[in-house]
Amino acid sequence: MQIQENRTAIPARGRGLLETGSVLILALWSVFFLSALAVAVHVHVASGIDLADHLKHEATAGWCAKGGAERALAEVAGASNRWDGLMNEPGSLRGVALGEGWFSVYYVRDNGTGLPVTNWGVVGEEGKININKAGKGLLESMLRVAGQVDAAAASETAASIVDWRDPNDDVDVLTGGAEGSYYRALSEPYPCHNGDFQSLNELLLVKGISRELFWKIAPHLTLYGTGKVNLNAAGLTVLRILAGASGGVLPGGDESVARKIVRYREAGNTFQEADAQAIVNSLNKFDSLTAAESGMLLGRGLMTFVTIRST
């Protein structure tokens, strides 16, 4: 019995095509893996580059901020006279180039437009009302003028501010203030501070100070200074507050005097003596005061609230 072996021979040309196909598939897989590796490396490197770029910008911003602070300190140190309010040339501290970055020094103040205005430069905090040193009458005027609340609400809220910062826990029932007993009875109780305000935001804890009222009065308040307001640096609203606290009863008189003071300063003038008669004389030379306006400045205690220099 014979067994015949039958084999199918693959021509040489066919074998070559198979080998070529295998090499092509291997090459494609290699390209795929290399592409995936390239993408992974790109993502890793790109994230590293982004991080380095971010750190560079952060460092630049930090040094620019330090430069702005040093420039502001230089402005303060250079204010060598005894009366100014740290006024600067308009725009002199706006967009100052420093290396690859820049800085601006600015403050925000109500210039009588009813909206906060950005002012480029440095200004003393003593152009505002010191919340830790203002008496009840000045606080009432602040609440009426800046907060636009009625006299009764202003009186009660001013008393609450005084109660919050005074060292005792005694309520003056005649003023309508609030001490620890009021705050402990709230649905979410907390103690009365009975000490100086540590931040302006602390006002939000005081009876009668809503968030809406806070944002109206906060731009005109400070924690710093001697307690007297610099007449050369105070904004229109603060000047109106001072006039109102001085006992102004002339209809619109507080605003008319305040606007004349602002116009006097905007013309490049400064008050150089902390004396009521000297202030009246200076204003009269620039923009004549009425008898009632002069009386408001001379006879109702304005000088108990003001100075002509920031410390």
Image (cartoon, rainbow, N blue to C red):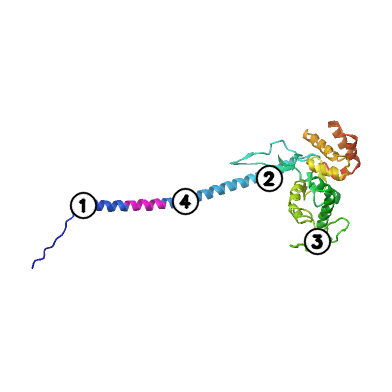
Q: Which residue is mark 1?
A: 14
Q: Which residue is mark 3?
A: 182
First in residue order: circle 3 vs circle 1: 1
Q: Residue at x 20, y 50 (%)?
A: 13
Res 296 seen here: yes
Q: Residue at x 42, y 50 (%)?
A: 38
Q: Which residue is mark 2?
A: 69
Horizontal placement of 296 versus 75: left or right? right
Judging depth in this view, the residue of 181 and 77 nearest the camera is 181
- Residue 122 percent across, percent down from the top left: 72, 42
Q: Residue at x 73, y 52 (%)?
A: 211
Question: Which circle, 2 or 4, is nearer the viewer?
Answer: 4
Mark 2 and mark 1: span between their CA atoms?
81 Å
Question: How many other residues sit within 10 Å of disc 2, few (<14), some (14-19) or many (≥20)?
Answer: some
Q: Which residue is mark 4?
A: 43
Q: What stretch of residues is rendered in magenta?
A: 27-37
Mark 3 and mark 1: span between their CA atoms?
99 Å
